[in-house]
Amino acid sequence: MEIVEDIVIVGAGIAGLTTSVGLHRLRIRSLVLESSDRLRITGFALSTWNNAWKALDAIGIGESLRHQHHLTPSILFASTNLDQPVSEISYKGHEVRCLQRRLLLETLANELPSDTIRFSSKVVSIEESGFFKRVHLSDGTILKTKVLIGCDGVNSVVAKWLGFKAPVFTGRLAIRGYTKFNDGHGLGPKFRQFVGKGLRFGFLPCNDEDFHWFLTWTPSTKDEELEDDPVKLKQFVMSKLEDIPNEMKSVVEKTQLDAIFSSPLKYRRPWELLWGNISKGNVCVAGDALHPMTPELGQGGCAALEDGVVLARCIAEALLKPGGEETNGKIVDEEEEYRRIEIGLKIFAQKRRWRSIDLISTAYMVGYIQQNNRTIINFLRDNFLSKFLPGMLLRKGDFDCRKLKY
């Protein structure tokens, strides 16, 4: 069975849903394919900075999410090698919140018409078909589309079709957890980060009841058996908390086993984006399919939101006439429309290439320095980088994707 669609988005994650909502705001329909049978909540929360909230406002959902997440006043950076906190930086004048991923994805999905997301739809292959692409699904369905967007994560089928290699393992792992305090955690709204001895801990309250935490480290061979066992994961984290304040230890202690998971930290080599095809014809990638990065800047999800707004705008400018009418009527020449789409996606690629390279490169270097356990690196990190890093985090989050006109 072959179905014709104007725009097919692969992946119902942050980038895919943001793109679809942006298009919907501009009165353009899209179909979102999700391989799972429901929205996948990989990870519990994400740091969101000015750039993320500008993107959320651009698609009209910022206010509803603000009401469910506290504004973060400051971030505390501390070294487990020192007795006193290294630095506390105020976020005054900046909008920083810890955003629950589940609420974000559900809010995005609820903004779309009910038939927009097609679950249990795994893409197995892509082929050329004149000015269209034919997308083959595992259930035998074939979708013929004018525009194909890959937002299918680090193992993207679309990115592979464009010629990108699989993201590279950094040699580091992350354990993430989520703790629910029904009577309130009483720990205040500030972010806390602790580094030293090859470890990086973060504790991020979302609101008065919900707390997100993480640990990143470089594993030894014996640590490999931890990955799929939440009991061992929790025990491992607790064993590394000796230099962390007791109130933070209690956050991990109260975490339920089904709210802990581990994952390898991967990234795309920046030079692949420099020379690679972010777009090709009527196909492009966005989100983690484009710029998988390590989490040190807290910009992975934020950049995906930026992608979605910028991409929706570029596609709309290609598909809509100056008067706001779609060009997908029969009177439009298919080759002309294909060229307009191709130009629109090239513009998207140009806008996102250097931004992606910057974020990937900076995050990788910060992670390398923060988790390096050499004496000289520890000294430089604790005495110099710790004072420079908070300001850099704010600067990386100052990107403005601009409002959509709808």
Image (cartoon, grey):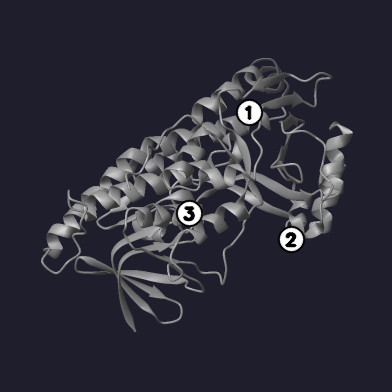
Determine which of the numbered discs, if any, sits on residue 355 in the image: none
322 vs 147: above or below: above
Please tell me which residue is depicted at 26% across the width and 46% down the height of the picture: 346
Identify residue for label 2: 228
Position of residue 329 measured from the top left corner of the image (x, y, whole percent)? 17, 66
384 vs 6: above or below: above
Q: What is the distance, in whole Å, between disc 2 and disc 3 at their CAs?
A: 22 Å
Determine which of the numbered discs, if any, sits on residue 369 in the image: 1
Classify the position of the N terminus by image quarter: bottom left
**Front-most of 399 and 27?**
27
* Residue 106, quarter of picture: bottom right
Label 1 is placed on what type of residue?
Answer: Ile
> What SS does tag 1 mark?
helix
> What SS does tag 2 mark?
loop
**Front-most of 380 and 14?**
14
Q: What is the distance, in whole Å, between disc 1 and disc 2 at their CAs?
A: 28 Å
Label 3 is placed on what type of residue?
Answer: Ala
Residues marked 1 and 3 touching at CB (< 8 Å):
no
Q: Work out which residue is located at the far bottom of the displayed protein and give it.
A: 1
Left/right of residue 379 with respect to residue 391 in the rendered view:
right
* Label 1 vs 2, first from the N-terminus: 2
Please tell me which residue is depicted at 77% across the width and 31% down the height of the picture: 197
Label 2 is placed on what type of residue?
Answer: Asp
* Label 2 vs 3, first from the N-terminus: 3
Position of residue 377 measured from the top left corner of the image (x, y, whole percent)? 67, 22
* Label 1 vs 3, first from the N-terminus: 3
Left/right of residue 277 with respect to residue 88 in the rendered view:
left
244 vs 333: above or below: above
Q: Is residue 117 visible?
A: yes
**Front-most of 203 and 180?**
180
Identify residue for label 3: 166
Instruction: Categorize mark 2 by other alpha carbons within 10 Å: few (<14), some (14-19), many (20+).
Output: few
